Image (cartoon, grey):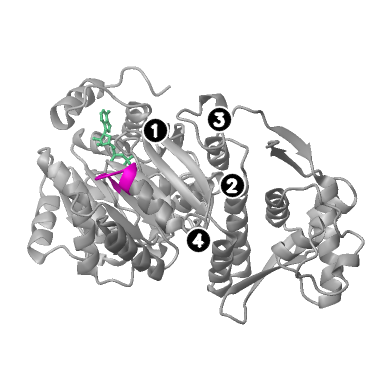
Amino acid sequence: EWTGEFPWTYQLKKDNFIYFGNVSFRPNQLESMNAILSNRDVFVLMPTGGGKSLCYQLPALWGPGVTIVVSPLISLITDQVSQLHERGIFAAALTASTTAQVRKSIFDDLRATFPRLRLLYVTPERISKSAMFHKYLTQLYNRNLLARFVIDEAHCVSQWGHDFRPDYTQLKLLKREFRGIPIMALTATATVEVREDIKVQLGIPNCVTFQQSFNRSNLTYYVREKKKNAIQEIAHEIRDKYARQCGIIYCLSQRDCEVLADTLYREYEILAAPYHAGLSDERRQLTHEDWMYGRVHVICATVAFGMGINKGDVRYVYHYSMPKNIEGYYQESGRAGRDGKRSDCILYFSHADRFRLLRMISDSEGSQEQILRNEQGVAKMASYCLNDVECRRQLLLAYFSESFDPVHCNPPCDNCDYTEPAAEIDFTEHALGLVKTCESIQEEIDKGPTAQYLIKVYRGCHSGLKAGHSSLSNFGKGKEMKEATCHRLIEDLISCQVFRVHTEIGPYGQVMATLQVNKSSSAYTCLCRGQRRFCLKTRAK
Ligand code: ADP
């Protein structure tokens, strides 16, 4: 429906070559342009590096109207505007840091019979808070010179997304106040939930949606157990495998960033620098620039280093600690290989990090619902890490409701790089066993056990058990189970809320996470009645 000839087809093709130097379109680019130029609301879902900008920059050159682009970060806006200037396209930015002089020239242009400005980039608070800007928008609208609104990084509108920005919620008013002006929303993130929320928040229920595969075929995914020598392992790998190449190491805390950068630099002479919210704006800006120009090879960063990173040749992204959910992981690891060349994504998993995350969540402000959601996010992420069988791409893409056949996993992820086949095994019996064991321990010590402790009892390890626990009826029932399999089963039980995780600070300041059986969950009832199966794929090693 959105392919074929339209009145603007010739000009779009010509301008694509003249202004952007492209000889063809990528999947869904031309189609989304046709839809927006037909005055439909459009939703474009494309992975990072897919070519979202072109979808609205090119249509902006058609017709007399001005395209208003809402973007969350000044740095993103500055980048885009200067790139457009280099291409000879008339664009400008209106943000908190725009000088009075530039602002005046923008407003002068908007008053002209035919504005020369093709794209005007604004931060969301311009829309919600600036009466002056609002006045100019209304004037453009009344003169039929308001071509369309573009909402870049549209997931920022959703509370369920990974980067919620309160100012984005004000964008509701666009549809209300500028009736008939089409909206194009773009994002690289989209769980089904977030996707639906974006449509509701922006008031575009009937938009035409363009979605392409989220598979990043040039990225290879690995998960490793995080042992004491993880830093050394990373350092050696960077030195031997990625010498002089650029990458990112994501850390959980500012302190981790500092320690890691310091160790890499001092002990291994790797050009590494920290990046986190505890550093001054200037420091961060400088580090970012040094890295962009290759004067720094490795950035050790918290998630504060995120949106707006536009470096093509990132060859590796390490997660020194697990991320807080799968969506975050997809985004962060996705900063590798934007240029399409082979790159690696390596995640280090430890239970200790998982508890640190859970602790951060229970300490955070937010509704009970939000906290529960975040806990489940961690549980799903942990299941992904503990899964040593299924294709990583398949697992990641399933999260975005996309199916993927592992035979196409090439270069293969760690789990696909095996020859012996995996089989799905029914562990329902053991799921029930773990739950019942947890219940008996809970009754006795008035508090749930830690996952490690529960597994010890269930697998029948005597060492370190409290008196009486080795005579529980389920003691040793899972002696033929692997420890990792028990952990995976427990994560599944957390995901469906049979177990709840309770965190507290232990005697040495460490985070303790204990399990509690949630008898009021429907999954618990189903499990006890034999109405729900718990199956896992495993590999006989
Ligand atoms: P996204 O915003 O989806 O991450 P960008 O818009 O930054 O992606 O585009 C990623 C890269 O792809 C840019 O370098 C851009 O110039 C290039 N690109 C986009 N569309 C095309 C095309 N049709 N042909 C060739 N290169 C393209």
Residue at the far bottom: name it: 507
Q: Is residue 82 magenta?
A: no
Residue at 34 percent across and 41 percent down: it is 241
Based on the displayed image, in which of its 4 quarters is residue 438 positioned? bottom right
Residue at 35 percent across and 43 percent down: it is 336
Whole-number angstrom distance, CA of label 3 to CA of label 2: 16 Å
The residue tagged 2 is 384
The residue tagged 1 is 218
Q: Which one is nearer the viewer's eye here, 66 or 474?
A: 474
Whole-number angstrom distance, CA of label 2 to CA of label 4: 22 Å
Q: Which one is nearer the viewer's eye here, 526 or 311?
A: 311
Q: Report ligand 1 position as a quadrant.
A: top left
The residue tagged 4 is 228
Looking at the image, is mark 3 or mark 2 earlier in the sequence?
2
* Identity, as a three-letter code, of the amino acid under mark 4: Lys
Does 532 appear above or below 229? above
Magenta region: which residues? Answer: 239-246
Does 41 appear above or below 501? above
Based on the displayed image, in which of its 4 quarters is residue 344 positioned? top left
Residue 33 seen in this snapshot: yes
- Locate residue 114, reporting x and y percent: 12, 42
Looking at the image, is mark 1 or mark 2 earlier in the sequence?
1
Q: Which of label 3 and label 2 is nearer to you?
A: 2
| Left or right placement of residue 274 versus residue 221 in this view | left
Q: State the SS at label 2.
A: helix
* Identity, as a three-letter code, of the amino acid under mark 1: Asn
* Identity, as a three-letter code, of the amino acid under mark 3: Phe
Looking at the image, is mark 4 or mark 1 earlier in the sequence?
1
Whole-number angstrom distance, CA of label 3 to CA of label 4: 35 Å
- Locate residue 441, reporting x and y percent: 83, 69
- Locate residue 494, reporting x and y percent: 70, 57
The residue tagged 3 is 404
